[in-house]
Image (spheres, rainbow, N blue to C red):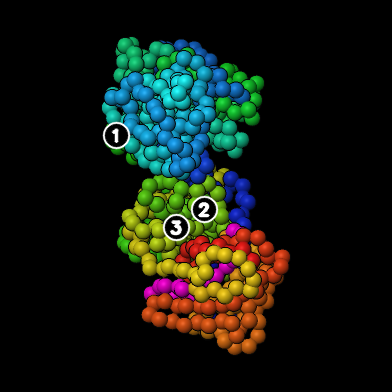
């Protein structure tokens, strides 16, 4: 993770040390990514459900639609208990045996297998909704009119499957667990969102009567009333409606209704909103939503967002900000490293965001954030829901995720009038190979996000870095290990023993080939503390381990570097440990950390 030129001592900034606890001030809309549950995106961020509609035009039939749905008021159909809500069952799909499911409407249902747990909780009422989220594969299963049979099998009217990493919609005229044919979970209010103070998606609502038609992103209707709003119609709470008097949980929901709106997904009482029941909700607090009359809403024309009737992907993600200019040079290319200059032009900006991924989601992305007021560059974690590490541009240390790494020394910031330019070099991990889009966004000085824009493409090339160690598991001390680092372009090899990937309290060694020096990091993982020559005299000693120079040998063969060491672990450094390894290339740009073994001292 750490590197420096061989001409001077290693000095590190501790960027391997635990995740930085920053407030939401430093992140844009969970970093512009889609909402997530247990590491799974709840559809990509460019999905229409996750797109702000506060700046879209009012639908020309808005007045007629409101008249059909009636005066309201709004009402939360969920709370502390299951009745009225949609309970969520989370499973590890790779460990759950497929259930036997009898389907009454197979022609508009998806095929199995279905990882439904035997103790699954079903929603109350005649609809008997079942929602199962497989977090191993990020696949959502939703069923309607669900019943568990005496033999442990299930009977449903219909069951749908949604890949939460995809924008794909149901086929035309297919229903789902709701009448609109949409996924339900991505439109439900969840406690974790309300507690965080921000819901970044539209909310499901019911209405009566509904129209004898549907509009994108819906695929089905269930009515014969032509004048009523079609299934899929999007409504929002008017910007002028004062929500300051609402109670805290209700206010978060109301703000989401202003920014993301509500989508008509089923027949039922008008203006009734839907969520996941949770004992941490306050029913009295949520009841404050009943102060909002139906007349406080307006229908939205979101037709300009549609790219394809079979996809929820939007033409202009996360509308709702100004119109800044963003660009990157080069705008396209390929390779395992990318040296770029991204420019952000607007009169009011405090934060610049750059996200590289196959689609607009922070999950599994290479995602960088520059905070201008603090002159700090951050990298988001692999889930895209928090920043993980920070460096000062032009300084020491390296930002690293499972997708990419950026040495601080390669980063520079320049300003000209209202333009901020960020230059940096990104090294992509081997696992991040393939075609990627480059997205950008800006947060203003109030840390309000703007529009995400796609500003480039890049084909991230696979690199040949691999590391193995013998033995790869076991226990005892002292122990002799032989590491094999294979790469066509390496000058530095890193090995780290700890219970998690942090330099703090680790047994951490670094070999620098140009200087033929073997280093040990200090107990904080922020700097090297000693150096020896392999095969020479002296001993590297840290709080967790020690390594005599005489027990170190280094040999090279082709693109392989073999490092043999005999490590004595301190008595206090006991318990199971992971063995991590990394490379630094001849430009002193690091790769990605790999866990290659386990060991118990």
* Percent of width and height locating residue 36: 49, 41
Using the rendered image of the protein, determine whether residue 57 is visible from the camera's viewpoint.
no
Going by the picture, which residue comes out furthest to the front? Answer: 151
Residue pointed to by mark 1? 310
Between the C-alphas of marks 1 and 2, the distance is 31 Å
Q: Is residue 231 above or below residue 588?
A: above
Label 2 crowd (10 A; few <14 / some 14-19 / many >=20): many
**Is 106 placed left or right of 25 in the picture?**
left
Query: Which SS class for mark 3?
Result: loop
In terms of depth relative to the viewer, which is nearer, 334 or 562? 562
Please name the residue shown 63% across and 81% down the image: 548
Residue at image position (57%, 67%) is 496
Of labels 2 and 3, earlier in sequence is 2
Instruction: Classify 486 as above or below 81.
Output: below
Residue annotated with mark 2: 380
Q: CA distance from mark 3 to mark 1?
A: 30 Å
Q: Which span of residues is magenta-colored?
A: 484-500
Q: Give the mark nearest the N terminus, 3 or 1.
A: 1
Cα–Cα span, label 2 and label 3: 10 Å
Badge 1 or badge 2: first in the primary sequence: 1
Res 59 quadrant in image: top left
Is 573 or 238 nearer to us in this picture?
Answer: 573
Which numbered tag is attached to residue 403? Answer: 3
Q: Is residue 294 left or right of residue 477?
A: left
Residue 313 in picture, x, y percent from top left: 35, 39
| Residue at the limit of the structure toward the right, as seen here | 572
- Residue 117 visible in rendering: yes
Q: Residue at x 45, y 21 (%)?
A: 149
Q: Which class describes the residues within 10 Å of circle 1: few (<14), some (14-19), or many (20+)? A: some
């Amino acid at each position: 993770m750490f590197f420096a030129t061989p001409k001077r001592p290693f000095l590190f900034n501790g960027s391997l040390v635990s995740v930085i606890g920053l407030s939401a001030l430093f992140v844009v809309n969970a970093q512009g990514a889609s909402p997530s549950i247990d590491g799974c995106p709840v559809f990509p961020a460019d999905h229409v459900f996750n797109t702000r509609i506060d700046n879209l035009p009012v639908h020309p039939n808005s007045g007629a639609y409101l008249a059909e749905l009636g005066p309201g008021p709004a009402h939360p159909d969920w709370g502390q208990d299951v009745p009225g809500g949609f309970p969520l069952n989370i499973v590890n799909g790779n460990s759950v045996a497929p259930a036997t499911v009898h389907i009454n409407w197979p022609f508009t249902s998806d095929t199995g297998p279905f990882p439904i747990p035997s103790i699954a909780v079903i929603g109350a009422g005649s609809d008997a909704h079942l929602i199962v989220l497989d977090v191993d594969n990020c696949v959502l299963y939703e069923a309607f009119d669900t019943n568990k049979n005496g033999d442990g099998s299930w009977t449903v009217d219909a069951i749908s499957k949604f890949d939460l990493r995809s924008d794909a919609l149901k086929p035309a005229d297919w229903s789902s667990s709701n009448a609109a044919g949409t996924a339900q979970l991505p439109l439900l209010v969840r406690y974790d969102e309300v507690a965080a103070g921000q819901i970044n998606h539209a909310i499901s609502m019911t209405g009566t009567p509904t129209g004898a038609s549907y509009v994108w992103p819906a695929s089905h209707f269930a009515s014969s009333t032509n004048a009523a709003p079609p299934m899929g119609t999007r409504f929002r709470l008017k910007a002028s409606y004062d929500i300051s008097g609402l109670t805290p949980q209700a206010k978060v929901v109301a703000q989401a209704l202003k920014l993301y709106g509500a989508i008509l997904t089923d027949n039922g009482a008008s203006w009734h909103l839907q969520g996941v029941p949770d004992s941490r909700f306050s029913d009295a607090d949520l009841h404050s939503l009943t102060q909002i009359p139906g007349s406080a809403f307006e229908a939205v024309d979101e037709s300009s967002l549609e790219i394809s009737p079979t996809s929820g992907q939007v033409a202009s993600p996360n509308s709702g900000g100004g119109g800044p200019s963003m660009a990157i040079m080069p705008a396209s290319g390929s390779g395992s490293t990318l040296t770029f200059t991204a420019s952000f032009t607007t009169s009011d900006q405090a934060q610049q965001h750059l996200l590289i991924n196959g689609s607009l989601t922070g999950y599994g992305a290479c995602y960088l954030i520059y905070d201008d007021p603090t002159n700090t560059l951050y990298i988001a974690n692999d889930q895209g829901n928090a920043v993980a590490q920070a460096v000062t541009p032009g300084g020491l240390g390296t930002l690293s995720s499972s997708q990419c790494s950026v040495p601080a020394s390669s980063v520079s910031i320049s300003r000209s009038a209202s333009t901020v330019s960020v230059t940096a070099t990104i090294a992509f991990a081997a696992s991040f190979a393939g075609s990627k889009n480059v997205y950008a966004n800006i947060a203003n000085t109030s840390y309000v996000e703007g529009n995400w824009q796609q500003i480039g493409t890049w084909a991230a090339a696979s690199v040949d870095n691999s590391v193995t160690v013998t033995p790869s598991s076991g226990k005892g001390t002292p122990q002799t290990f032989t590491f094999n680092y294979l790469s066509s372009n390496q000058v530095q090899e890193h090995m780290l023993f700890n219970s998690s990937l942090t330099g703090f309290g680790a047994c951490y060694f670094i070999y620098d080939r140009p200087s033929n020096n073997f280093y040990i990091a200090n107990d904080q993982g922020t700097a090297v503390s000693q150096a020896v020559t392999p095969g020479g005299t002296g001993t590297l000693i840290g709080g967790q381990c020690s390594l005599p120079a005489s027990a170190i040998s280094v040999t090279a063969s082709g693109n392989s570097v073999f490092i043999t060491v005999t490590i004595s672990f301190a008595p206090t450094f006991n318990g199971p440990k992971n063995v991590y390894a990394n490379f630094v290339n001849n430009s002193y740009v690091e790769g990605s950390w790999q866990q290659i073994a386990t060991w118990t001292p």
